[in-house]
Image (cartoon, rainbow, N blue to C red):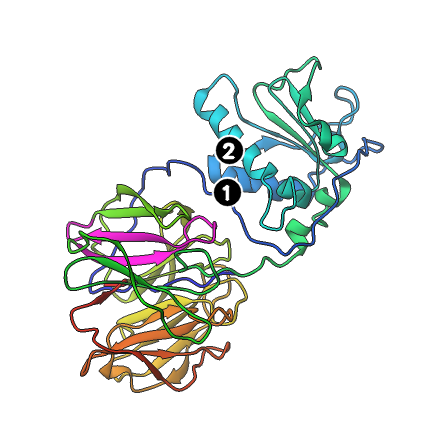
Amino acid sequence: MRRFFAVLGAAVMMVVLLTPPASAALPAPAFGSAIDAYAQYVGQSTCDPDAKPGVVGFRDILTAEYGRGGGISRECDQGGQSEHKEGRALDAWFDATNATQKAQAAEVLNWLFATDQHGNTHARVRRFGVMYIIWNHQIWRAYESSKGWQTYTGANPHTDHIHFSFSWAGARKQTTWWTSTPRGLAAESVNGDKYDDLLAVDPGGTLRVYPGTATGTFGGSSDIGPGWSPYNRIGVGDTNADGFTDILATKADGSLHYWHNSGQATFERVPDIGSGWHTVEWFAVLDVNGDNRADVVGRDGDRLYWYPGRGRGAFSERAFVGEGWATFPEFAGGDADGDGDGDLWGTNAAGELYFWEGNGNGTFSSSRRVGSGWGGFGPFNVMDINGDAKADLVAVRADDNTLWRWLGSGTGGFAVAVQVGFGWSGYRLAHH
């Protein structure tokens, strides 16, 4: 479950077809320590070739990242024994003779075999219920995991696809990848802890980070780097589900730029990943559909659109959400209650605050008024400062440049405002 930082501005961005990301952003939700045992071998004993849901779900993840599918089912009268005939095997189309696809295959396998934060080896292999894998003359067996990869001498060398066979639990979506609730991580945390951090450009053009704390306040700032004055809109959110906030920024010419958080207090800049982002009048960054990748919700005139995130700062073409949004010139997004999908808040000309609960599919519930008196504040930000999985609000009061925060109730409303800073004249919070 994730809470995404609001990215607000006077003129914002419209998605065009973007360059594919440099590397895929395979999902990496953080689970608790409980994990499945290694799958034991259970060979084909019946013939029921209908594709099983866990195999379909796994294939869909690979297809979403790499644009290629794979075969699951095999007719009963074709070939010998095979889990394909029970709908619990996948041939994922990766070609070992193609350098790009071979590198992508390595990325998939590294993702599956990585040790998790609890020290669980081969964590995603086990959570998906993978029984064995065959690829490029080698085989790995979960039931002989200590032997590692072994030479495969079968008639088909599996150089044009990776074969995955699944346990029945994995095939039926009964393993922890499908049944456990991922542990919530902050989406605006620079260092990957559970407290969202506030980013702001100081009067000299240096981007600074103010760490969130358990008390709902911010610690002393540290520099991310200089040279941020040319960027008229700066937003943050976890674009690739690794638990570290990334940075998006646009220039006046509508170009979109991206900085990937290395997880070691440095950011890798990927310039010019998109153009045409100056036509949308207002937008927010939040995980609309609960896939742990930041999306964009933007207002174009009276219409609201959703731009699904593809990872590493790339977005798909927009989908229509609804009309009637011209009366809410400023809005922001985050996760009100920690259920994993994003919600929206917006203010109207009268300074009233409204809330829309997300449905997890690009639609939102009817609006509900949750506050007033916002006319004297600058654009507000949504973030989980204190790590309680409830979205909070932060804004600068215009008349005295003091910083205020409102802790979230978990139902879309907020506690009484508390001042958490002063001296914010000339600063731009990471949303302008």
Q: Position of residue 317 (x, y in %)?
A: 36, 48
- Name the residue nearer the viewer: 16 or 156: 156
Residue 325 at least partly seen: no
Side of 87 where 22 appears, left or right: left
The tag earlier along the polypeptide, 2 or 1, is 1
Above or below 108: residue 370: below
* Kind of residue sitting beneath label 2: Glu
Q: Magenta stretch: give its range.
A: 231-254
Task: Give the class, few, some or many, for how many residues have Cα within 10 Å of label 1's Cα (few <14, many ≥20).
Answer: many
- Quarter holding residue 122: top right
Circle 2 sits on which residue? 107
Contact? badges 2 and 1 (CB < 8 Å)? yes
Residue placed farthest to the right in the image? 45
Give the residue drawn at x 55%, y 38%: 111
In front of the other: 118 or 269? 118
Taking 311 as reference, is 290 above or below it?
A: below
Please, is residue 272 above or below residue 297 in the view? above
User: Mark 1: which amino acid?
Assistant: Leu
Residue 243 included in the magenta stretch of the image: yes
Q: Where residue 233 is drawn, which disc sits there? A: none
The structure residue drawn at horizontal position 50% and vertical position 65%, both measured from the top left corner, is 359
What is the CA distance from the residue labelled 2 to the residue labelled 1? 9 Å
For residue 65: magenta? no
**Residue 86 visible here:** yes
**SS of the residue under disc 1:** loop
Residue positioned 45% across, 65% down in the render:
195
Q: Locate residue 305, reporting x and y percent.
A: 35, 59
Q: Which of the numbered marks, if any, corresponds to residue 26? A: 1
Query: Is 136 left, or right, of 194 in this rendering?
Result: right
Instruction: Between residue 340 and residue 357, name the one nearer to us.
Output: 340
- Picture quarter with the C terminus: bottom left
